[in-house]
Image: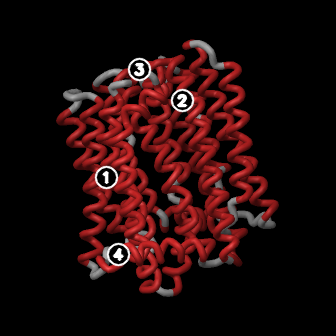
Amino acid sequence: MANKHIKNYFYILFVQCGNYIFPLITIPVVSRIFGPELMGKYVLLTSIVGYFSLFVNYSFNYTGVRRITRGFERKNEIFYTIFFSQFIIALVISSFFLVCVYNIPLLSENKLLSFICFISVFACLGQQNWIFQAYSDFKLITYISVLTKICALIFILIFVKHKDDMELYAFIVQLSIFVGAFIGFILSILKYKIKWVPPEFSVCLQYLKDDFYIFISSILSNLYTTTGVVILGMMTSNTEVGLYSSAQKIIDLMRNFSLLPLNMLIFPLLSAAFGHNKEIALEHIRRVMPLFCVFCLLSAVFIFLFGDLIILAFFGEQFSASSLLLKILSIGFVAVFFGVVIGGQVILNLQFDKQFVIMQLIVAIVSLILNFMILPSGGAITTAIIWSFSEVLMTGLQIIFLRMKGINLFYIQYFKPKLLFKTAIGLISK
């Protein structure tokens, strides 16, 4: 079992290295070709399309893992019920997107680019990675991710040369996501011998009803994470969006490299642990929380010390204004890290779904009010401050809520260096 966990960690770490290396090579190239304005337009359109992807994903990345780990014998029913539910949603929102493209100026003025970006919505149908998480099996994900990224990287370096190649760049990126998703979909069916079980429409509706609060939480989370970019684009310019999104991309890279491997490995294990014994699961989290704190502190210090050099190396002098934004966003990054652990691993596993949504609703309302009140004053800097404040507020509300329920995740004795080292060794050896 220990060897399997170690292998899984390194598989996921390898995937995230690919997620890191791919932008490491492409970002310096495309940012210098397209500049802040065109990159801002692309980010703005992908942010809008991201709302549609949220509907297709619903909340199955979380609840799919929860269902499978607590009932492996029902894998066939769960798999196809989730897929069919997503398929129905995709049909409905595709019709709505067509209406938007021909009636919203931003989309109608960039029809081709909008449709290309929408490919990612259909890719969501194939991204059933939750089943790999449930089985703690990440070898296939690693191979597929690395292969599609290498292919995309080669095509970008060969064919993307001029500012007029924005649509081509977008198509290469989106197509690689789509192909990778459906290769994974087919291989998951073959590997886990998932047999066709005709999904019942009533069961699909029940899944949607059961997962509604977590779905709403993803919508609300998007309101205070991504909507700021859309509002920034509406009230200022594509250049401001380009500067902000460049700094945010560095934060996303750090999150992909550090947070997601732990999240994908720990979530299924904790989900199963919470299903058996809540107190033991909470004790595991209390022991690893100091490690999270140390990591977050080191990450923030690293960004503050080397933020200017990172922006210069990745994006060039055209994006020098992004360095201050990166330092502001680093505060939010620390809060995001704690939010995923406390919210995703504790509150949701304790099935406080409704309360979690209420907290996100509060933060979303505060974030929207601040964005509409303050922007366009301050531009991208204002958006960065509001995003970081929103993430800190969300984490604070989660900690307060758990304390009100009599749950304390921070025990001072676990912060001693000797225990920190012991916990780290224990995680590796499990």
* Sooner in the amino-acid sequence: mark 1 or mark 4: 1
Q: Residue at x 22, y 31 (%)?
A: 375
At a point 38% along the width and 22% down the height, the residue shown is 238
Q: Amino acid at mark 4?
A: Lys
Q: Secondary structure at mark 1?
A: helix
Disc 2 or disc 1, which is closer to the eye?
2
* Front in this rendered view, residue 302 or 335: 302
Determine which quarter of the picture holds residue 191. bottom right
Q: Amino acid at mark 2?
A: Ile
Using a 10 Å C-alpha cutoff, classify the residue at mark 1 as few (fewer than 14 neighbours), some (14 to 19) or many (20 or more).
many
In this rendering, the answer to whether 182 lies above or below 335 is: above
**Mark 2–mark 4 distance (CA, rounded to whole Å):** 40 Å
Q: Residues within 10 Å of mark 2 (few under 14, many from 20)?
A: some
Q: Which of these two is toward me, 93 or 359?
A: 359
Residue at 74% from the left image edge and 42% from the top image edge: 147
Does residue 103 appear in this view?
no
Q: Earlier in the sequence, mark 3 or mark 1?
A: 3
Label 4 SS: loop
Q: CA distance from mark 4 to mark 3?
A: 43 Å
Q: Which residue is mark 3?
A: 317
Secondary structure of the residue carrying tag 2 is: helix
Cα–Cα gap, marks 3 and 2: 13 Å
| Residue highlighted by disc 1 | 391
Observer-nearest residue: 277 or 7?
Answer: 7
Q: Position of residue 246 (x, y in %)?
A: 43, 32
Label 2, label 1: how far apart the Cα atoms are? 26 Å
**Residue highlighted by disc 4:** 416
The image position of residue 248, as x and y in percent, is 41, 38
Horizontal side of 122 relative to 104 (left or right) equals: right
